Image (spheres, rainbow, N blue to C red):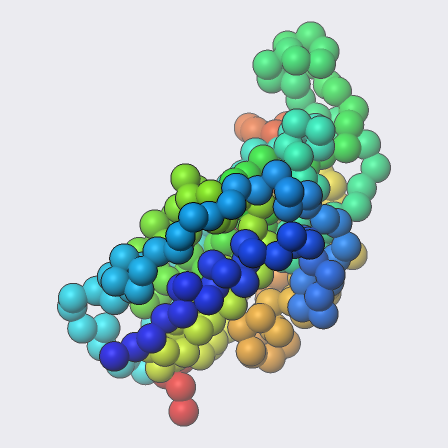
Amino acid sequence: MMKLPHLLLALAICTSSARAFAPSSVFGCTAKINSASLPVLKSSPTSAETDDVLKPKYEIEKLPFRIGHGFDIHRMAPIDDAGQPIIIGGVIIDHKDQKWTDADGKYVEKGGIYETQLGVVAHSDGDVIYHSVVDAIFGALTLPDIGQVFQDTDPRWRGCDSSKFMEHACEVMSEYGYEIGNIDVTLILERPKVASYKPAMKENIVKLLKTTPGKVNIKARTHEQVDSVGELRSLSCHVVLTLAKSS
């Protein structure tokens, strides 16, 4: 029977009082979240409660290749409202004040432009690339989506470093006998610009999924000032990947 260490995952994410966004060789950034505000868990889920989600009753056939698609979108807001920075592909996106559209009229006239530092509104750290990659891996394996595995109503994942989700998805993939074939990421955001951060994002993905640079591609594009993405009120990501049967 396949063993998926959900209990260890939860403990690794949530028990340290010094929990930070990224002071690690893999995550490569320095911003911290105050873990004192995180809820204290009375208990962790049992293996029976968690394994069922990633162990379907049907057989997952050992196909030579599998294809998965992942998508994620998160709202962006002034950083004081968001409570955390913009983190994409494990990298904090430093930026100057941006022209954010205040759709609700909280800071300026409704629909007006408010110049501000931006953050991502999310239950976890809101990393759209990592979430899309995890969703694509689960999808390729015909498993439930990331929202079912790491529910946004679960206090354990509040402010969580999404590299933990990536590590877990990699382990699940390996347990089912697969490795990364290739990954193609399309990041969609109007601002801030991220071209200079893409090499670090790629390096993080390569390390977390135990693959090679020639199998990971990251593209970024704007939304031509259209809709919430174009107004800097959100950012999104698509990921297409293949899984290859492990040799």
Closer to us: 133 or 19: 19
Task: From the viewer's perspective, tell me whether residue 120 is left or right of residue 31.
Answer: left
- Look at the image and tell me whether residue 198 can be seen: no
Measured from the top left, where is residue 25 in percent x and y?
Answer: 72, 70
Measured from the top left, where is residue 161 in percent x and y?
Answer: 59, 54
Split into 4 quadrants, where in the image is the C terminus?
A: bottom left
Split into 4 quadrants, where in the image is the N terminus?
A: bottom left
For residue 7, which quarter of the picture?
A: bottom left
> Across the whole image, how many numbered discs are drawn on residues?
0
Residue found 16% across the figure and 66% down from its top: 57
- Give the residue furthest to the right: 96
Residue 61 to residue 32: above or below? below
For residue 179, which quarter of the picture?
A: bottom left
Residue found 71% across the figure and 14% down from its top: 107
Task: From the viewer's perspective, tell me whether residue 21 is left or right of residue 209.
Answer: right
Task: From the viewer's perspective, tell me whether residue 36 is left or right of residue 55.
Answer: right
- Give the residue furthest to the top: 109
Residue found 35% across the figure and 82% down from its top: 177
Residue 8 to residue 2: above or below? above
Measured from the top left, where is residue 171 in percent x and y?
Answer: 44, 73
- Give the residue furthest to the left: 58
Residue 121 to residue 188: above or below? above
Closer to us: 76 or 169: 169
Residue 103 to residue 64: above or below? above
Measured from the top left, where is residue 124 in percent x and y?
Answer: 54, 45
- Look at the image and tell me whether residue 75 can be seen: yes
- Give the residue furthest to the front: 42
Residue found 69% across the figure and 54% down from its top: 18
